[in-house]
Image (spheres, rainbow, N blue to C red):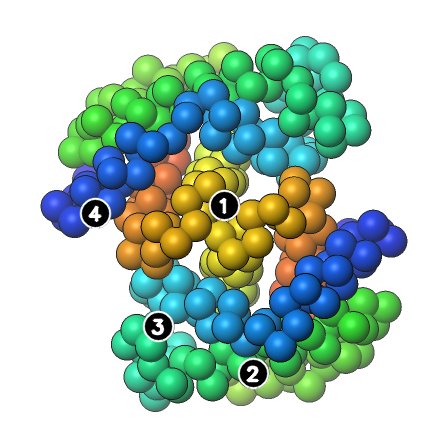
Amino acid sequence: MALTQTDRALVLALWKKMSTNVGVYTTEALERTFVAFPSTKAYFPHLDLSPGSSQVKVHGQKVAEALTLAAHHLDDLPGSLSALSDLHAHKLGVDPANFQFFSHCLLVTLARHYPGDFSPKMHASLDRFLGLVTSALVSKYR
Amino acid sequence: MVHFTAEEKAAITSIWDKVDLEKAGGETLGRLLIVYPWTQRFFEKFGNLSPPQAIMGNPRIRAHGKKVLTSLGLAVQNMDNLKETFAHLSELHCDKLHVDPENFKLLGNMLVIVLSSHLGKEFTAEVQAAWQKLVAAVANALSLKYH
């Protein structure tokens, strides 16, 4: 699986539109993940996960920065996400299924906030992008 | 057996009343075929599936999407009895249609995304959670008769 030129253009267009609000949406996606897929909370016993938690916002912002970095380094995702891959593999040990729960909730969030932009093509491009980010993140697992 | 709380049932039924089965069904199935193109393997007889715009405009896809959502309506009415409700459909999907149950999960998640894009603010995290529970339970019920 690789991103076509169309995929890249669509992903970057949405990122441009979201501008400085990427963190708002990744935070909402995290909140949705914790509510809809409660098993994911197992990785965050050290955080206050109640609705509106500022700690979740902080984490959401970290995720936003990583995704924005990824969106601007589509030619070298494994390289640009290498440090994060090490972290998730060797320190955090997050089961890969959980990235899919989060990716799905991010799509739900973006569909809800940008319904007019969320064409099937955009949807497919975002899904592929998030799939590649996930692959890069788990690439060092074993 | 899955148990739905009163709140979950209310979240599900309140949304369901607003769903246009043909529109949402067509969109859900169409997006499934576009985002996960390997699912097109089940619909080769449906005519034009390329390019993506053809899928969204294909009347047979719309009609089939409506059929699928109508069955999901059965789930909404029988949340306490999904196993029996979907026994026959499970046999059909295994014995006649040969559909990998993994596809039911993909379709369920696709429906959740479509509902989110149509309902906006109303599709809160709690409402989404109730719907994730329902689609997972339906996917499971549909796989029970597989052998």
How far is disc 2 from disc 4 in space, using C-alphas?
A: 32 Å
Query: Residue at horizontal 79%, vertical 78%?
Result: A79
* Vertical order, A39 against B86 (above or below): below
Q: Tell which circle, 2 or 3, labels the residue nearer the N-terminal end.
A: 3
Quadrant housing the N terminus of chain B:
top left
The residue pinned by badge 1 equals B117
Whether marks 4 and 1 lie on the same chain: yes
The residue pinned by badge 2 equals A62
Q: Chain letter of disc 4? A: B
The amino acid marked with disc number 1 is Ser
* Vertical order, B147 against B46 (above or below): below
Query: Which label sits in the foreground, 4 or 1?
Result: 1
Tell me the element at label 4.
Answer: helix
Please give the label number shown on residue A18: none
How far is disc 4 from disc 3 in space, using C-alphas?
A: 20 Å
Query: Which label sits in the foreground, 1 or 3?
Result: 1
The amino acid marked with disc number 2 is Lys
The foreground one among B122 and A138 is: B122
Tell me the element at label 2.
Answer: helix
How far is disc 1 from disc 3 in space, using C-alphas?
A: 26 Å
* Vertical order, B22 against B47 (above or below): below
The residue pinned by badge 3 equals A41
Quadrant housing the C terminus of chain B:
top left
Say which quarter of the image contains residue B90.
Answer: top left
